[in-house]
Image (cartoon, rainbow, N blue to C red):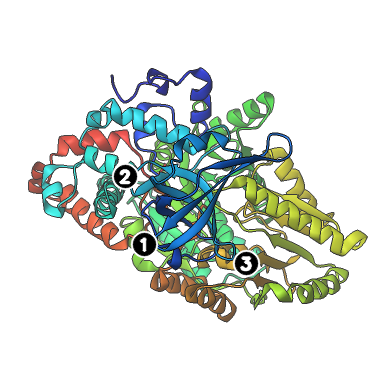
Amino acid sequence: MNLHQPLTVLPGVGPKSAEKFKQLGLESLQDLLLYFPFRYEDFKSKNVLELEDGEKAVISGRVVTPANVSYYGYKRNRLRFTLKQGEVALAVNFFNQPYLADKIELGAALAVFGKWDKTKASLTGLKILAQTEDDLQPVYRLTQGVSQASLVKLIKTAFDQGLDLLLEENLPQVLLDRYQLAGRAQAVRAMHFPQDLADYRQALRRVKFEELFYFQMQLQVLKTEQKNVRNGLAMNWDQEVLTAKKASLPFELTEAQERSLREILQDLQSPAHMNRLLQGDVGSGKTVVAGLAMYAAAAAGLQSALMVPTEILAEQHVASLSQLFPELKLVLLTGSMKTAERRAALAAIETGQVDLIVGTHALIQEGVSYHRLGLVIIDEQHRFGVGQRRLLREKGLNPDVLMMTATPIPRTLAITAFGDMDVSIIDQLPAGRKPIITRWVQHEQLPVVLDWMAKELQKGAQVYFISPLIEESEALDLKNALALEEELKAYFGRSAQVALLHGKMKSDDKESVMQGFKDGKTDILVSTTVIEVGVNVPNATIMVIMDADRFGLSQLHQLRGRVGRGQKQSYAVLVANPKTESGKQRMKIMTETTDGFVLAEEDLKMRGSGEIFGSRQSGLPEFRVADIVEDYPILEEARRVASQITADPNWRQQADWHLLSLHLDRQDYLD
């Protein structure tokens, strides 16, 4: 048996259940072994006197009354017995599980996992535990049709068959010894079924180092390749043409835009290969700088490609670039284009009839041939892996590469996270942009906010209303968003049009809702956090974020940046009753500054929120287990040792370069 075989080789997995597991990204045996829990239930027995009301816990004791099952309603019943822990007697109720009566023996010791009701001194049972049950039980992310029990059972089956022993060690012995890391097979087993907390921590440390080390190795190898590439393009254009173009723009560039543009143009003119990151806060005008760089490339007779993560963003870029640079011939290339339309676009790209190609990952698919591709710009670069970026670079004449991100990342972290890429920063807002006024209110004050909103809507404002994402449950997200939509419809009645946008919607439906909002047909857009980075609705001037304390600072800042796109005064209202000090501190900082870099630095200092850079729109790469901010010391050490290995032949020998190369080819931690 090998780990690349499908799950169907395991007993009990037929084609139907394999389809369900596939929705979780589990197709091979290796996928299953490396699908780690996101948290653990602690099944150590607790003292009933120390429990909080509503707390889930394990209570062990002796059964002092026989199990009694009473029936009420159709197929509804309650199993009830009394458990005594020390001197305390408590009632235990199990609903609709009459078969558990066989497991409850009078006078026997029993451990029950359930929810404690302090006022009734009773436990609503969820599970009867075997005496041999582990203290730590894994909890996995699920999808419809897959239960915790079925997933745990399948993973246990894989371990019972010894499949973890087939996992090849992918770290050289010299690093295992140097950092005292557990072996790979041992660590993977302990990630799922740790003997105790110490065992889990050792496994976690090993897995985090492995992820961050290979991520850094990829960056260092890429950097070495690029340093060796001296046959970059030295572009030449008529300086006067570019000066005239800048003068014709309907606004003046800020000093920060000028500085960043100067750095990019110098790279384009140099024979060395450009590999630069352009960081700019939301609304700081990165697109104009990128547009001028593409204009310079066109003036030098070369094509540019702008790759963005979604079709709605690609269309928006085409619209704004066509307006600013009517002289450039633009074409859009996306996956959903009709065949004839796509064929015409591909022909125009290949024959050099277009200067600028804007698209999604369709830009790197087979069949796309560029005429003379000189500049590649990747927007929200963390969404595209090293492999995808390399593919795009190989499409042209070893083009210069500019990457952009709207997430302000502290410089120290940017240098570590993005290798030795050159970094340009736009840290000023364009002239005329008014800073967004941010207020923090508690839930009880929401009626006052709605009353104020009604007046603003009468003046023609539009509003984003964000319902928070709850990671474990998409169904709950939707329920919250639907409830919020209903409340707002009931409150505003006919005086405002309310629409809903959420992650479960089809792409076409999402785009149609977003278009309705952009066109002003919708006054209030209720949304889970699926509002795309960069989507531009100048008339939207109010952003209300419910349960704002659930979000990381940078995520709140990203959301706030969806307003304030026009000349009108914009507002962000954070509705939250944070229970922790760090939650209160986050709300306070948000009201004090609109500078994303200040917030990013604060985020680094606080580190307590668990999801410092928010979740999926972070601007930083995502890993199975590691967190680039929380695990910064591991990341820094991984960078140090990866750069030593790539630079020093002695280190290469010690670190078993053949093993590293083998695994570097197999995994792309950035994809």
Q: Earlier in the sequence, mark 1 or mark 3?
A: 3
Q: Position of residue 54 (x, y in %)?
A: 55, 61
The residue labelled by disc 3 is 560
Q: Residue furthest right?
A: 494
Describe the element under mark 2 as helix, strand or loop: helix
Could you tell me how many numbered marks the image carries? 3
Q: Mark 2 packing: few (<14 Cα in 10 Å), some, or many (20+)?
A: many
Q: Which residue is mark 2?
A: 191
| Label 3: few (<14), some (14–19) or many (≥20) C-alpha neighbours in 10 Å | many
Q: Can you give x and y, in whole percent of width and height, for residue 489 in the image?
A: 84, 58
Split into 4 quadrants, where in the image is the N terminus? top left
Q: Residue at x 69, y 66 (%)?
A: 543
Left or right: residue 498 versus residue 66 is: right
**Mark 1: which amino acid?**
Glu
| Residue, disc 1 | 630
Where residue 138 sits: x, y (%)?
39, 45
> What's the amino acid at mark 2?
Met
Q: Earlier in the sequence, mark 2 or mark 3?
A: 2
Identify the residue shown where x is 76% and y is 64%: 463
Residue at image coords 63%, 75%: 431
Q: CA distance from mark 1 to mark 3?
A: 24 Å
Up the image or down, 282 lies above or below 160; here it is below
Q: Report how far apart the C-alphas of labels 1 and 2 lie in the structure.
A: 19 Å
